[in-house]
């Protein structure tokens, strides 16, 4: 059971490991883009390419849907970023229950956006957990964990890709050893929740430190992309999206959001504490460009919340 790219890699790993996939569950096709074209999810595309039976119920609470699942007689169900709540009848259907791959070291960052929340909070380490699912939100016992360092250069996309590989190796190892693994209860003292990202959170508050703003930029790349209001010598105010930046050591007496220096390949912005060097930006309605190319066309004057 899975829907996005993160889950697609897990499906591929299970097939490669020789497991007999009796069914693939994913979210129903949804309209996407400006044209609202009905589109399939990455897991369905991969399942169809592999010739696997695919199911897309609107809800798992429907009795006929539950009977259909039980008729598959699966020994275990692997659930990763599926996008639906699993009722007790589904959790108990397979012999070994349902195993979830969660992209954090539980109980830290239970919930919808563990990768982004780890980066934006400045965590130095994360990982994946293989969890025996129960009716709670990421509350099940842990069967296996694998850790992963978070680098200063990691974006949500790069960390996603690393954790997807860890998840694939973790679930195959778990299935190989499932008879011998001892479930470990989560430590209730370390619980944090990774709430879903909102577009409102993407707006940069320049009164924050350069480190905090850079964490926000990295966490929100590739979605929803950190943004700010910008003014330049050629426009009064437009939305500027910032895709990458560096924190640099540079003393200044500018106010937060003011441009310290902007010439050729550099653009230094004052923050509430420290200086941010912009690297990749995108002006509303334009393509993503390097700061050097941006500076060839515009001269930034000020950034504001």
Image (spheres, rainbow, N blue to C red):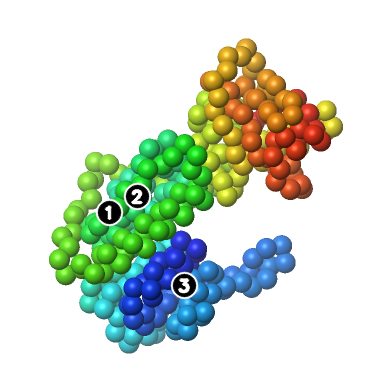
Q: Which residue is mark 3?
A: 26
Which circle, 1 or 3, is nearer the viewer? Answer: 1
State whether residue 114 appears in this view.
yes
Secondary structure type for disc 2: strand
Q: Which residue is mark 2?
A: 127
Q: Nearer the viewer, residue 139 or 262?
A: 262
Q: Nearer the viewer, residue 123 or 172?
A: 172
Mark earlier in primary sequence (2, 3): 3
Give me the residue at 64% from left, 17% from top: 255
Mark earlier in primary sequence (2, 1): 2
Tag 2 and tag 3, C-beta contact below 8 Å: no
Q: Is residue 304 left or right of residue 197?
A: right
State whether residue 208 appears in this view.
no
Which circle, 2 or 3, is nearer the viewer? Answer: 2
Give me the residue at 65% from left, 15% from top: 254
Mark earlier in primary sequence (1, 3): 3
State the mark number for residue 145.
Answer: 1
Tag 1 and tag 3, C-beta contact below 8 Å: no
Residue 201 appears at what percent x and percent y? 56, 41
Tag 2 and tag 1, C-beta contact below 8 Å: yes
Residue 181 appears at what percent x and percent y? 17, 63
Q: Nearer the viewer, residue 144 or 56?
A: 144
Question: 10 Å neighbourhood of mark 3: few (<14), some, or many (≥20)?
Answer: many
Secondary structure type for disc 3: loop
């Amino acid at each position: 059971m899975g829907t996005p790219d993160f889950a697609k890699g897990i499906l591929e790993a299970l097939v490669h490991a020789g497991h007999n996939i009796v069914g693939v569950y994913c979210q129903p096709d949804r309209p996407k883009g400006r044209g609202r074209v009905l589109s399939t999810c990455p897991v369905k595309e991969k399942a169809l390419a592999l010739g696997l039976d695919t199911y897309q119920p609107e809800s798992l609470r429907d009795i006929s849907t539950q009977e259909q699942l039980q008729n598959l007689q699966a020994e275990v169900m692997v659930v990763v970023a599926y996008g639906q709540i699993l009722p007790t009848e589904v959790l108990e259907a397979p012999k070994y229950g349902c195993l979830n791959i969660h992209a954090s070291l539980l109980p830290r960052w239970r919930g919808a956006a563990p990768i982004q929340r780890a980066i934006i909070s400045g965590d130095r380490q994360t990982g994946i957990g293989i969890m025996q699912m129960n009716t709670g939100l990421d509350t099940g016992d842990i069967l296996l964990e694998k850790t992963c360092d978070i680098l200063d250069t990691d974006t949500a996309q790069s960390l996603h890709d690393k954790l997807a590989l860890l998840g694939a190796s973790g679930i195959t190892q778990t299935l190989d050893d499932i008879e011998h693994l001892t479930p470990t209860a989560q430590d209730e003292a370390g619980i944090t929740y990774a709430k879903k990202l909102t577009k409102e959170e993407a707006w940069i508050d320049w009164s924050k430190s350069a480190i905090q703003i850079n964490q926000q930029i990295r966490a929100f790349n590739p979605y929803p992309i950190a943004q700010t209001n910008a003014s330049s010598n050629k426009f009064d105010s437009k939305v500027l999206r910032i895709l990458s930046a560096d924190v640099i050591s540079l003393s200044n007496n500018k106010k937060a959001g003011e441009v310290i220096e902007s010439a050729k390949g550099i653009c230094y912005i004052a923050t509430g504490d420290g200086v941010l060097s912009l690297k990749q930006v995108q002006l509303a309605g334009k393509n993503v460009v390097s700061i050097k190319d941006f500076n060839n066309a515009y001269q930034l004057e000020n950034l504001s919340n």
